[in-house]
Amino acid sequence: MQLDFHQLTLFPLFTGICEEDLPAMLTCLGSFQKRYKKEEIILLESNEVRSVGIILSGTVHMIKNDSEGYQTLLVTMKEGELFGESFSCGSHLDARVSFLAATSCIILFLPFYKVIHSCKLTCTFHHRLIENMVRLIGDKNVQLMDKIEVISKKTLREKIMAYLHQQSMEQNSKHFTIPLGRLELAEYLCADRSALTRELSYMQRDGLICYEKNTFKLLL
Amino acid sequence: MQLDFHQLTLFPLFTGICEEDLPAMLTCLGSFQKRYKKEEIILLESNEVRSVGIILSGTVHMIKNDSEGYQTLLVTMKEGELFGESFSCGSHLDARVSFLAATSCIILFLPFYKVIHSCKLTCTFHHRLIENMVRLIGDKNVQLMDKIEVISKKTLREKIMAYLHQQSMEQNSKHFTIPLGRLELAEYLCADRSALTRELSYMQRDGLICYEKNTFKLLL
DNA sequence: TGCTTTATGTTGCAACTGCAACATAAAATA
DNA sequence: TATTTTATGTTGCAGTTGCAACATAAAGCA
């Protein structure tokens, strides 16, 4: 499968880099792409991470498994987002989390060492690449804070409300569709699935929200 | 107060940069330092962040306040750690969290724009600076994941255990002293203070741990 | 030193929520 | 299409934990 370089320039990691420069740059960086089927593991916890991944298409979940087999959904990531950077760039080379293909997806991998160590050939746009990457890492950081904000709440109702508010903000509307099913949402909220549906129906009864499947409306 | 440039080279942000180069570099970057008293606010949520801060001495808490006045302790940071990068470098310029001086401390600020946009003068070591900074941002990311790992647990006992295990790992010993008092620990665990002390005494009764004030011993 | 403030420990009670077990709906597969 | 699998909704029950109120200890301060 061929890379669509024009499409690539639309990704945040490559903004400000000319389409003509991309092929040389990607070759120079030793990038490669890979397809994953739904449910496939892209990167398993405690494996060493040497590359950052860019999601060209599909959805990736960052998940954490604990020793008793419980699983938590940390972050959901879409097209254009980065993953693996915290490990490939940080002091903790071994991944503390796993990355899972939530849908079938295509990932472009960039060996981190080459990204951060500029070479003569690409030096002109290289700097822009690093800048973009730093921004994306910062954004990931904010996503983690968002999750903490949600699960810090004491009651399940407050957690749900915090999550729905975040979604409402992101989608700029009181009426929106969430990207998670009940099972996944329960996992993200660190709550029990049945308790989640129960609380959702109580919240509708109490006139807080109004929903149908994954489409919600905040009634303030 | 004068900067101790030799001491600065020991900070992770400046590793690999010569002591002789530091003064010029810091001037070129427009860095400045500031002292804060205990309990003082270094950076308030929703203010625009243009600089990253390096903790030269003291302890800084990253905290999140919700609309009802509840507060959560997100991360505790010590000497050499970075803060503010997620905002000054990311797409979300407004801080979503506040930074508070947990003890009196001295902070060195570096305007982010100048850090990321190299200038001729400092270009040789500039690249190393960016590399160090990216690593530190990744580390911060991991700290946030650590917190999520802890508060994702369903029961308070599991949360406490997860936290103690992390501390035990970090300090490479089954016997260690935690950096948080009961109030702060409760805030970090998103739990009630009195419930926390109750559960701690139950855990000691059940032979899981053994503690005295802030010094704990894991009995496996 | 004595006084005030803050941190920590203790306990009863009510309520939230995890768990289990089941029913139903939707989706995947043959 | 029929059958299996998976996702979702419902509910009783018991355990955990937040809350309040109070006691004690430690720290800050005059």
Image: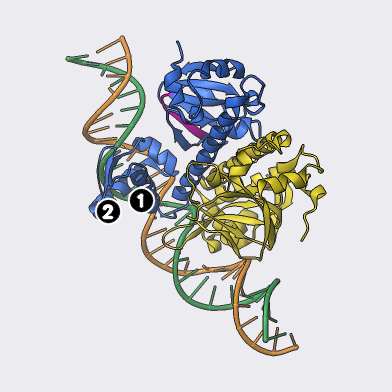
Chain colours: A yellow, B blue, C green, D orange
Name the amino acid, label 2. Answer: Leu
SS at mark 2 in the image: loop
Crowding around mark 1 (Cα neighbors within 10 Å: few <14, some 14 to 19, many 20+) is some
Which segment did they paint magenta? Answer: B57-63
Residue B51 in view here: no
> What is the x, y in percent for residue B48?
64, 26
Callouts 1 and 2 close, C-beta under 8 Å = yes
SS at mark 1 in the image: helix
Query: Quick check: D26 left or right of A8?
Result: left
Residue linked to disc 1: B161
Name the residue at 55% across, 42% down.
A89
Name the residue at 62% across, 59% down.
A201
Going from the N terminus, do you reach mark 1 or mark 2 first?
1
Name the amino acid, label 1. Answer: Met
Query: Quick check: A63 left or right of A171?
Result: left
Q: For the residues marked 1 and 2, what is the alpha-carbon distance in whole angstroms?
A: 9 Å
Residue linked to disc 2: B208
> What is the x, y in percent for residue B208?
27, 53
